[in-house]
């Protein structure tokens, strides 16, 4: 019985896709309990043949959609719509999961009293040049657990680690945990995703569509959870876009205009103060009531 559906959007990343599928083949969760759905956002490489090379060992399906610009949200919606699992795990091409990660996703969801949204821990994401050099000396798609141990020793932590150090790892107590809902590695109940409308396909440039979905899960009373044992690492590769900050700023303003939550109103301050993340901005301003937020 399929319990988990892993949905992976991809675009001309055949080698990275192979690495991700290799890590999924090594999962401790029984292979009958999960499926993998790869949705190609109009790529022209040999990703389909990569998927086919795994199809006799794991339950993996491939779908291709016409190249009509950046449509990662639509790709994930296609995967979610056809998924058979009760829980959806979203990972990006080039994210490799620890061998027990799907088992841990399932355990957390099945033991939860209420619907939860899980934030996966991603080692090695957005490393600087020196960090990439160190990582390149140890990475191996066939031995993810050893690589994760080595990355821990190198302190190549999740880019959000400083937030966890500062505000604690129980993110359900944070004012805006949805700001961490990055689909490089997250999961949620399929029924909850359908209920809130899945990804907004009008987000057709890099970034924002995942946090936007996180806001709606938050508004639907999903509890947000981060567990370091639900981990993965990000295989270093060239960035698809260089102006991340500009895209993030635009998405943040758009999200606030859509929902007008008191939490999202702080996006008007976020990015004006040297990239301080949303939850920290909220904490700082709420501790200083004389400061006001422009809405």
Image (cartoon, helix red, strand yellow):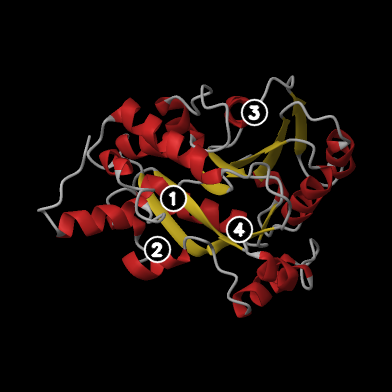
> In 3D space, how far apart are the residues under numbered discs 4 and 3 (Cα atoms)?
21 Å
Q: Give the mark, 1 or 4, whose residue is nearer the N terminus.
A: 4
Instruction: Tell me the residue that label 3 is attached to.
Output: 70
User: Which residue lies most toward the bottom here?
Assistant: 153
Q: Do labels 3 and 2 touch, CB within 8 Å?
A: no
What crowding class fits label 2: few (fewer than 14 Cα within 10 Å), some (14-19), or many (20 or more)?
Answer: some
Q: Position of residue 34 (x, y in %)?
A: 66, 44
Q: Which mark is residue 256?
A: none
What crowding class fits label 3: few (fewer than 14 Cα within 10 Å), some (14-19), or many (20 or more)?
Answer: some
Instruction: Tell me the residue that label 4 is attached to.
Output: 126
Left or right position of 118 against 11 = left
What crowding class fits label 4: few (fewer than 14 Cα within 10 Å), some (14-19), or many (20 or more)?
Answer: some
Q: Position of residue 52 (x, y in %)?
A: 87, 37
Q: Residue drawn 49% across and 28% down? A: 198
Q: Give the mark, 2 or 1, whose residue is nearer the N terminus.
A: 2
Instruction: Tell me the residue that label 2 is attached to.
Output: 163
Can residue 188 be seen by looking at this rendering? no
> In 3D space, how far apart are the residues under numbered discs 2 and 4 (Cα atoms)?
15 Å
Q: Residue drawn 50% across and 33% down? A: 209
Badge nearest the viewer, 2 or 4: 4
Q: Give the mark, 3 or 2, whose residue is nearer the N terminus.
A: 3
> In 3D space, how far apart are the residues under numbered discs 2 and 1 (Cα atoms)?
10 Å
Instruction: Tell me the residue that label 1 is attached to.
Output: 180
Left or right position of 69 against 268 = right
Q: Give the mark, 4 or 3, whose residue is nearer the N terminus.
A: 3
Q: Give the mark, 2 or 4, whose residue is nearer the N terminus.
A: 4
For label 1, the SS is helix
Q: Do labels 2 and 1 touch, CB within 8 Å?
A: yes
């Amino acid at each position: 019985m399929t319990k988990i559906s892993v949905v992976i959007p991809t675009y001309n990343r055949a080698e990275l896709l192979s690495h991700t599928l290799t890590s999924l083949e090594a999962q401790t969760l029984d292979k009958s309990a999960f499926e993998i759905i790869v949705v190609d956002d109009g790529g022209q490489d040999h990703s389909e043949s990569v998927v086919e090379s795994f199809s006799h060992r794991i339950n993996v399906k491939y779908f291709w959609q016409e190249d009509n610009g950046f449509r990662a949200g639509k790709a994930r919606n296609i995967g979610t719509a056809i998924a058979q699992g009760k829980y959806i795990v979203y990972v990006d091409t080039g994210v490799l999961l620890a061998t027990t990660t799907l088992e841990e996703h399932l355990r957390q969801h099945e033991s939860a009293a209420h619907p939860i949204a899980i934030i996966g821990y991603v080692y090695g994401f957005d490393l600087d040049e020196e960090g990439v050099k160190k990582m390149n000396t140890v990475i191996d798609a066939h031995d993810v657990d050893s690589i994760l141990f080595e990355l821990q020793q190198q302190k190549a932590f999740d880019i959000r680690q400083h937030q966890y150090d500062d505000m604690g790892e129980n993110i359900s107590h944070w004012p805006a945990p949805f700001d961490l809902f990055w689909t490089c590695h997250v999961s949620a109940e399929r029924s909850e995703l359908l209920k809130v409308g899945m990804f907004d396909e009008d987000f057709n440039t890099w970034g924002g569509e995942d946090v936007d979905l996180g806001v709606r899960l938050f508004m639907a009373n999903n509890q947000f959870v981060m567990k370091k044992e639900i981990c993965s690492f990000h295989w270093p590769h060239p960035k698809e876009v260089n102006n991340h900050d500009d895209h993030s700023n635009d998405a943040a303003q758009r999200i606030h205009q859509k929902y007008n939550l008191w939490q999202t109103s702080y996006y008007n301050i976020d990015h004006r103060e040297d990239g301080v993340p949303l939850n920290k901005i909220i904490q700082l301003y709420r501790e200083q009531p004389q400061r006001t937020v422009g809405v």
